[in-house]
Structure formats: structure tokens, C-alpha cells
Amino acid sequence: MSDEIRNALAQRIYDGSLMPNARLIELSIAEEFGTSQTPVREALRELEAMRLVQSEPYKGTRVRQITPREMAEAYMVRAILEQRAAELAAARFENNTSALEATVERICDSAKRGDIDAYAQGNLDFHRSIVAAADNLVLLQSWDALRFEARIRVNLFRKENAIVARAAEHHPIVVALKQGNGIEAGRLLREHSESFAEAWAKEVESPSSDTDTPSPSCTIETSTATNGSD
């Protein structure tokens, strides 16, 4: 039950139904879901770990403000971490990208269907699998600390419209990794994340600006990656 409550509340935060600073009252939530307050407390603790809500003594729990600046900074840090991860993991992926390819197909399929939850999960799986393959625990822990399980969904609901086009950006990354070209894969991953960072940074400067930039359609890339450096 706590998972159901957590997911429902998280969805409302992502889509803006629950606005920043909105108070989350345990008793009211328990009554809505027909349960006791115990699973509600568990759900709120998990949401706090995801940095979607914040609790203060004697003030209760409220929806946390996720600012454009915070999103921009998180994507910029992710860009750096994933670039290095690709460089370290490339040897493990050389001629061994079938799992990544399947994940990209899952991402593209969910994008075409407009299934945001499936797209977000596939996206998370893709990027984390590359970081995990780097075999550097500190790097992985640093990536996990950015909490992109939540940030990907925030980005999808509030910023990104062209998810089919964005999904296609994962194909050349796989091509580069299949060739064992960590430099190229790292460059592509960094540019991918930096594009989101730049979009959020523009909102810091001008909240009303339109920052979506179209990318190629979601089709299998047949071209091969070329060697290059940053």
C-alpha cells in the first residue's frame, strides 16, 4: 500500500497537481486511500528520500520546490559523471551491447506510445547501466545521489515534449560503445545531458522561454560512430 500511495503522490507532484509548498496531511491521505496512517508515513519517507517532499518538526510535510537551477545543475553534474563512466565502461561493452540495444528499443517504443512512466524507467535503466558498467562504486554512488528516478519524470512533465526525438539520441551512444569507443560515447552522453541542463538554465534566465529543441526521429541508427575527442 505504501508503494501505491508513494506513486500516486509522486505523480501529482510531477504533473503539478500538487504544487510546491502544498501540505501533505497524513490523516487526509490515509482516508483517501482507505488505509491507516502507517503506510502513509512510509510513503512520505520514501518521497523525502527522493527529495520530492520535505518534513519539518511541528510543521508537517510539504511538497518541495524543485527549481530550474537545481535541475540544470543536476544535469550538468550527470553529464560529467556519465562521460567518464562511458570511457571506463567502453571495453566491457565492445561487441556486447545487446542489453543496451533492447533497452533503447523499449525507450523508443514507450515514447511512441506516449507512456511516460515506461519511458522514464527505460531511460533510467539505460543511463544507470552504463554508469554501473564503469565498475567504480564512488562514481555510481555519486550518480545515484542525483536522484534521477525523480528528475527524469520532472523533466518529462515540465520541460520535455519531444520524447520520441529524444529517445533517438540513445542509438549513437550504443553504436559507439559497441565499437569500444569510450571517448565518442562519453562525448555523446555529455552532450545529451548538457542539452537538458541548458534548457533548464534558460528558464532560470527567462522562465517563459521555450527551450525544447527537436532531435532526429526515433529510428534505429545505421551509421557508425567515428573516433573523436572532447
Image (cartoon, rainbow, N blue to C red):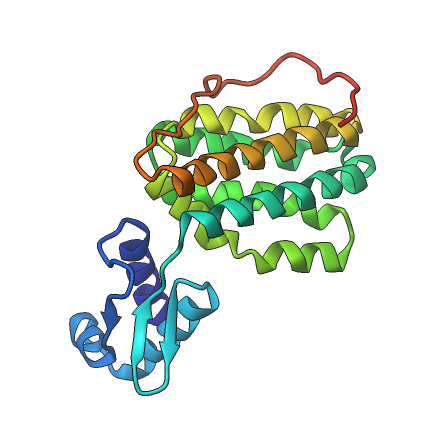
Residue 135 x, y percent position in the rendering: 78, 52
Q: Residue furthest front?
A: 205
Position of residue 11 relative to residue 196, above or below, is below
Question: Residue 120 sits in which quadrant?
Answer: top left
Give 106 or 156, whichever is nearer the viewer. Answer: 156
Indicate left or right for 78 with 50 as reference: right
Left or right for 142, reference 56: right
> Residue at 57% of width from left, 37% of height from top?
193
Q: Residue at x 41, y 34 (%)?
A: 110
Q: Residue at x 57, y 35 (%)?
A: 194
Q: Tell me the quarter of the image containing the N terminus.
A: bottom left
Residue at image position (79%, 19%) is 227
Q: Nearer the viewer, residue 223 or 14?
A: 14
Residue 126's place in the image compared with 47, above or below, is above
Q: Residue reaching furthest right?
A: 91
The count of marks equals 0
Residue closest to the eye, 19 or 48? 19
Classify 30 as above or below 134. below
Left or right: residue 93 compared with residue 7:
right
Q: Quadrant of the C terminus?
A: top right
Q: Residue furthest bottom?
A: 58
Q: Nearer the viewer, residue 220 or 169?
A: 169
Find residue 129 and report its image quarter.
Answer: top right
Q: x, y (%) of residue 215?
A: 47, 20
The location of residue 150, given as percent across then percent down, is 44, 54
